[in-house]
Image (spheres, grey):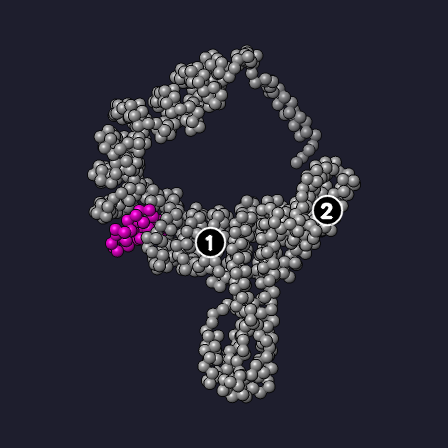
Amino acid sequence: MDFNQENLFGQIEDLQELSFIERPVRRYLKTPEEIERLTVDEELNDIERAVYLLSSGQDVQRTSVVVNLPNLMRQNTSETIRRVVPKIREVLHVAGVEMQLAAAVSFLTILQEELVSIVAYIHSFLPIILANLDHRDTVVSNAWLETLLTVINALPKETIRQEILSPLVSKAQLSQTIQSRLASCKILGKVARKFESHIIKRDILPLVKSLCQDVEYEVRSCMCRQLEFIAQGIGVEQTKSAILPELVELAKDEGSSVRIAAFDTIVNLLVMFDSDDRTQIIFPLVMMFCEKSFKADETILAPLSHQLGKLCHGLSGNLTEEQHSWFLDFYKKFSTLGLQHENGQSDHTTQFYAADMDAKYVSVRQNCAYNLPAMILFVDPKCFYSELYPTFSTLCHDPETLVRRTVATGFHEVIKLLGSGVHIVHKELIALLQDESLEVLDALLDHLPEILRFVITGGDHVGSESKVHIPDLIPALSVAEQRAATSLKWRIHEKLLLTFSCLPQVISSDQIYYKFLPIMFRIMTTNNVLPVQRASARTLCVFVRYNRKQEQRQEICSKLIEQLGQGRSCWNRLRFLDTCENIMDLFSKAFFCKYFFLPVLELSSDPVPNVRIKFCYMLPKLKSALKLPADKYLLQQLELCVRKLLCQEKDKDVTAIVRIITLELDRMEISMESFPKRLQEKDLLDHKKEKEENLLLEMEDMEKRGEIKSMNEKKLLSSFNKDGKKKTKLGRSRSLGGRVAPPKITTDKSAMKLTSAASNSQISTATKNALLSFDGTLQSHSSSSGGPSNLPSCPSRFYSANSNEQKTNWGKAESQILNNMERNVALHG
C-alpha cells in the first residue's frame, strides 16, 4: 500500500465526510410518556395487577399476564378463575398472534399440571379453546387445535359428545372453510379412540366418509391419515367392510399426497387384515402402486421406499415365491435408483457416477439403507449372502454421504441378524471405518463397541476362545483416528477416543500396547483441544486397567510420570492430574497409592500457580485414597504438603483455595483396614477393584509358570532322545501345549484309555500353559502292569494334585474379569 502524503490526506477527508452523516443516538428505549403508561401502582396485589393490565395495559403487558397465568393459578386458583380468566376471554377477541399463542400454551400447562379440576377446566377454559379454533390466522388456529387435541384425552365422553362432536357436524360441511374441515378431520381421529365401536359407526363414520370424498385433496389426505385411528376404534370386522373400500379408492386418487397417505395407512393397518385381504386386495393394490411410481409418478418414490421394509415384513407370510422375488427385485431396483454403472456392471467395486443426482433419488436410496434390517428378515438371514449382500455392499459404497451414514447407523442391527454369518460384512465394516466423511464415522461410533464385540466373537457370546481375527481392523481404527485428528470436528475425535475404551474387550493387550497406547500418548502431549486430551487420558487409563502384563503396566505408569507429571510443559502436568483422577476412578486405592501418590504430591511445589490450584482441588481425593495403618507414611507426606502450602504459598488465589480445602480435609475420615465390617459402599467397590487386579496378577503368574514348565518339558524330551531311547515310543507333543503323550502299552488297558482321553481333550493353549504341572522325570512303569521294564512308561500324572482346582479357579477368574471389564467400561468408558 502506498502511504504517500496525498493518499493520507485523501483518507482524512473521507473520514471528515463520514462525520457529517452521524445520527444522534437515542439514550433511552422509552420516552417519559411511554414509561408513565407502563407504570403500575406497586400497592396492587398480583390478581389486581393482572386485572388492571388486561383492562388498560399495553399489548406486551397483557401478554405477560397470559404467560404468567399458571403462576397465578398456583397462588390463588379461585380468584384467578373468577377475575382474571374472564378478562383474558374478553381480550383474546382482539389480541394479536403473540398473545393468542401464549394463551394456548398457558391453558395447556394448566391442564397438564392439574392446577384445577377437570370440571372447572371444562367450565372456564374449554369454551375459550373452542371459540378460537376458527381464528383467521392459520398459525393461531393450529395452536389452539393442538391444545384441544391434548385436552380431549382428559375430557369425559359426555362432554366430548356435547361440546365437540355435536358442533363438528356443521364444521365438516363443504360450506365451511378448508381450515375448518382439516380441523374436523384431526378431531374425528382423536375422539374415535374415546367411544365404543357402535357409537363410532353411528355418529362418526358418516362424517369420515364425507370427508374422504371432499373436493379438496388436502382434506382427503388429512382424513385418510386418520383412518388408522378410526379402524382401531371400530375393530377388525368393521375395518374390513367400512375402511378398506375407502382406502382402495383413495389409493387411486388423482392427488399424489392422497395416494401417499393411503399407502402409509394401508401399511400401518396390515395387522388388521386377514390373509385373504392381503393376498387378493392389498398385494395387487401395492403392486400397482409401486409400478405406477416408476412409470408415471416419481413424487411418491421416497414415501414408498420409506415404508417398503415394513410392507415386505408385514406381507411376508402371505406371499408366494414369485411375489417374494418381485418385492426383493423391487427393493434392489430402488437401492440403485439414480446411479449409472460403468460397462453395465452392477458389482460394488464398479466406480459409480451420478447421471442425475436428484434429491429424491438420494432420499430413496437412503430409505433403502434404513430398511436393510427389515429386508434381511424378509429374505431370511441364512440367504443374506446370495440375495442381499451385493445390495448391502452397494449401499455401503454409495456416492452420497447420507446413504452411507444411514447404513452406518443401522449396522449393529444388521450384524445381530446375521449371527454367526457376521464375517460376511467384515469388509464393509472396514470401509465404513475408513470412510472419507466423518459423518459416517460419527454414526458408526454410537454402537461401535457393540459392533466390535459381536464381530470379533463371530456372532457368539463373550468368550476368549471364540474370538476371530480381522486383519484390517486395527489399521482401519488408526486411519479413523488420524482423519478425526486432522479435521476441525474435535467432538467426533473425542467421541472416537472414548469409544476406544472398548478395545480391551475385543483385541489383545499386546495389540493395544503397541498400536494404540502410542496414539494416546501423542494426543495427550500434542493435541490442543482440552476435551480430546481428557478423552485420550481416560481411554489410556482403561487400557492400563485391563492390561494383562504387569511389566507393561509398570512401564506405562513410569512413562506417565516422566512425560506428563515431570514434563517441562505445565499443560502436560495438568493432564497428569487429570489422568490421576481417572486412575482413582478406575483402579483401586492401593494401585494409585503405589504408583502415583508421591508423584502427585511433588506438584504441590510446581512453579505454575494453575497447577498448584488443580493440585489443591485434588487434596480431598488424595486423602480419601489412603488406608490406615498401611498408608501412614503417605498421610504424613500429605499433611506436610498442606502445611507447606499454608505457610509458604505466596499466590493469593492458591492460598484462598488451600484454606477452604483444609477445612474440608479436617472433616474427612480415613478408611481403616482393621475394621472391615464398617466398610462403606465405596470401600466395597474399592475392595472389588483390588481383588480384580490381584486376579490379573495371579493369571499372569500362572501363564508364566505354564510357559516355564513347557520349556522344561521340551528340554527333557530332547535330552531323553539324545540318550538313545526309542523316539518312536513317544507320542506327539503339541506346540506350547506342554503335554507329552504316553507310549502305547498294549498290556495295560487302563493306560491305553488314559492315552486316548488325553489326546482327545480340547483345552485352550493359554489354559494348558497356566495349568500343566510336570514333575520333570519319567517314572518307570509299575511292575504289576506286566509290561516290559526297558520301555519308558507314561508319567503317573499329567497334572499336579490341584490341577482341576487350578483350572476351575483360572476359568472363573478370567470370566469374572471379562464380565467386570465390560460392566466397568460401560459405566466409565
Q: Residues within 10 Å of mark 2 (few under 14, many from 20)?
A: some
Q: Is residue 783 visible?
A: yes
Element at label 1: helix
Q: Earlier in the sequence, mark 1 or mark 2?
A: 1
Q: Residue at x 34, y 42 (%)?
A: 303
Q: Pointer 1: what residue? A: 451
Q: Pointer 2: what residue? A: 638
Specify the label residue 525 is tagged with. none
| Of residues 656 and 819, the one drawn nearer to the viewer in this rendering | 819
Q: Position of residue 75 (x, y in %)?
A: 49, 21
Residue 285, picture quadrant:
top left
Q: Residue at x 61, y 44 (%)?
A: 530
Q: Position of residue 750 (x, y in %)?
A: 46, 79
Q: Is residue 269 left or right of residue 663?
A: left
Q: Is residue 768 left or right of residue 528?
A: left
Tell me if residue 770 is in the magenta stretch.
no
Q: Residues within 10 Å of mark 1 (few under 14, many from 20)?
A: many
| Of residues 238 and 396, the one drawn nearer to the viewer in this rendering | 238
Where 239 falls versus 710 (above or below)?
above
Q: Is residue 142 visible?
A: no
Q: Which residues are magenta?
A: 309-337
Residue situated furthest right in the rendering? 648
Q: Is residue 599 left or right of residue 278?
A: right
Where 293 falls versus 745 (above or below)?
above
| Of residues 239 and 397, the one drawn nearer to the viewer in this rendering | 239
The kind of residue on which mark 1 rests is Ile
Q: Position of residue 52 (x, y in %)?
A: 48, 13
Element at label 2: helix
Where 108 falls versus 485 (above or below)?
above
